[in-house]
Amino acid sequence: MAQESKKLKIVFLQTGKTKTKEILALEKEYSKRINRYLKFETIVVPDLKNTKNLPEDVVKKKEGELILKELQSGDFVVLLDDKGKQFTSLKFANHLQKIMNR
């Protein structure tokens, strides 16, 4: 029996809900563009409550646990971080294509 191939999809996993109208509009636009080629969805991990008195490392650990609950074995994770390596849109698309080809 042939193994059924998995459908590729991109999941944008974010912590906390975006409230800025401009960011929401960009999310909607890119979601529309990506959905032409691949299934795309956004998952929002809710902000933690009552963290004012907790050390930063504890908050990060708890957020990390919530994020890990959303991941499945076999997922390929790309972290988007303003301190990370920067790509143009075209280079990022090429990077994603290489990942999908694996």
Image (tube, rainbow, N blue to C red):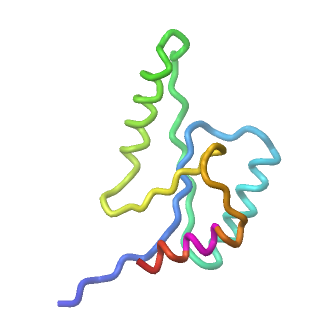
Q: Quadrant of the N terminus?
A: bottom left
Q: Residue furthest front?
A: 85
Residue 2: image x %, image y %? Answer: 22, 89
Residue 56: image x %, image y %? Answer: 50, 20
**Foreground: 24 or 79?**
79
Q: Residue furthest bottom?
A: 1
Q: Residue furthest top?
A: 53
Give left or right: position of 4 versus 78: left
**Foreground: 90 or 29?**
90
* Residue at horizontal 42 percent and vertical 76 percent from the top: 7
* Residue at horizontal 51 percent and vertical 9 percent from the top: 53
- Magenta run includes residue 30: no
User: Does residue 93 sit above or below 86 in this rendering?
Assistant: below
User: Does residue 16 sit above or below 57 in this rendering?
Assistant: below
* Residue at horizontal 63 percent and vertical 72 percent from the top: 93
* Residue at horizontal 29 percent and vertical 83 percent from the top: 4
Image quadrant assignment for residue 63: top left
Highlighted magenta segment, given as a residue range: 92-96
User: Does residue 46 sit above or below 38 in this rendering?
Assistant: above
- Number of numbered markers: 0
Most frequent secondary structure within the magenta stretch: helix
Give left or right: position of 30 versus 47: right
Residue 45: image x %, image y %? Answer: 51, 40
